[in-house]
Image: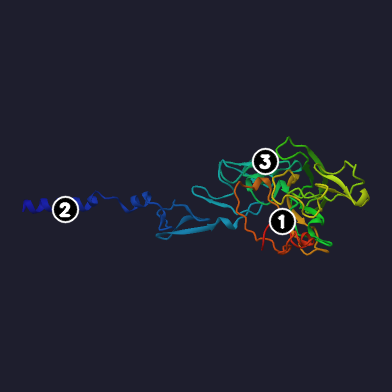
Amino acid sequence: MLQRASFLLSLSLVVACGGGGPTRSDAAIDASPFVDGGFVCRTIDSTGCVGSVWHTCIEDGEFLSTVTRDCAETRDPMDNPYLCLNGIGCALCSPNRQFCVGNDAVLCDETGNGYDLLEECDLDSGEVCRDGECRNLCDVAIEDKSYQGCEFYAADLDNASLGRGRDASAQQYSIVVSNPSPLATEVVIEVNDAAYGDEPVLREVERILVLPGDLETFDLPRREVDGSSSNRTCANPSDTNCPVGESCVCGSAGAPPCFCRVSMTATGMNDGTHTALTSQAYRVRSQFPIIAYQFNPLTNAGVFSNDASLLIPTSATGTSYTVVGWPQTIADGDCDPVTDPRCADVDFDTSRDD
């Protein structure tokens, strides 16, 4: 009888102590409210973010119910959605982080719902707020590596030249720039008159103020990158106003018309080297980022061939490119320049057969 009473006493102690395991409320306090990507109210104090939705808990009779608020439905003065931050809830910004409000650089406060002004970026001098800092627009273009930039190089490339007035390469070469920014920007076109590899001799060709949202066209002198004759008009064989490396060549007995040519025997029709490393490019500089194009020739009036290119700024160029092209045949006929004097007008490249 004494042994049975002792057994019952020990059993009651085990039941009363619950085996030493945690109570349900203890487990709820220690457990995370996030289960399989969702939110569960473990205690009345459970809170958390699932995506942009802030979750809190309320008592609902004997149970706990979840209350949600989509922070993204609240917008800041710049129409950006509020953030959902664990431990805070819906917040304007991440505490102690810099960000932009309009064109001002600001610092988020400890609460996540206010900020202090750090700097007012001066748009008139080309500053914009980027990642909580005032940055120069041209510096931003360098980082973005897009087709907008502050420096470009353009080249007057070869085009077909067949003679008898069919000379697309001699038509107007032009650069067109557009200004996408809210600021007027000054655009300058320059050339280097020095030979390739020599100390640069820069010469300004044209300067234009381009208004916000506007575009301007620069009609430029012929300056083919392979050194073809400029065909610029000149007065007489003694005229020294031709481009470097060219002479004034006139008709019979030195009579006009006279044109600047690369040699006394040059025809003026794609008479360059065709492949060259020269200083013949045009440099385009701008105070603020612009978009630039080149047209060769500008219009298709009276010609049968023209080219247009979107220029890549130096801030976006790399060092290695693959060019996919097609051999030109429009001005190439299989004739013998020795026996046929008209071959130069028919066969663009007499050194090869097509």
Callout 1 environment at 10 Å: few (<14), some (14 to 19), or many (20+)?
Answer: few
- Measure the C-alpha gap from mark 1 to mark 3: 33 Å
Q: Position of residue 293 (x, y in %)?
A: 74, 54
Mark sitting on residue 309:
1
Q: Nearer the viewer, mark 1 or mark 3?
A: 1
- Amino acid type at circle 3 is Cys
Callout 2 environment at 10 Å: few (<14), some (14 to 19), or many (20+)?
Answer: few
- Measure the C-alpha gap from mark 2 to mark 1: 92 Å
In the image, is 58 to the left or to the right of 186?
Answer: left
- Amino acid type at circle 2 is Leu
Q: Which is nearer the eye, 208 or 330? A: 330
Earlier along the polypeptide chain: callout 2 or callout 1? Answer: 2
The answer to whether residue 68 is above or below residue 194 is below
Look at the numbered disc 3 and give the secondary structure of its residue: strand
Q: Quadrant of the C terminus?
A: bottom right
Q: Which residue is mark 2?
A: 11
Q: Nearer the viewer, mark 3 or mark 2?
A: 3
- Measure the C-alpha gap from mark 3 to mark 2: 75 Å
Q: Position of residue 252 (x, y in %)?
A: 91, 52
Q: Which residue is mark 3?
A: 134
Q: Which is nearer the eye, 352 or 89? A: 352
In the image, is 173 to the left or to the right of 255?
Answer: left
Residue 126 placement: quadrant? top right
Q: Position of residue 171 (x, y in %)?
A: 82, 57
- Amino acid type at circle 1 is Ser
Say whether marks 1 and 3 touch (CB < 8 Å): no
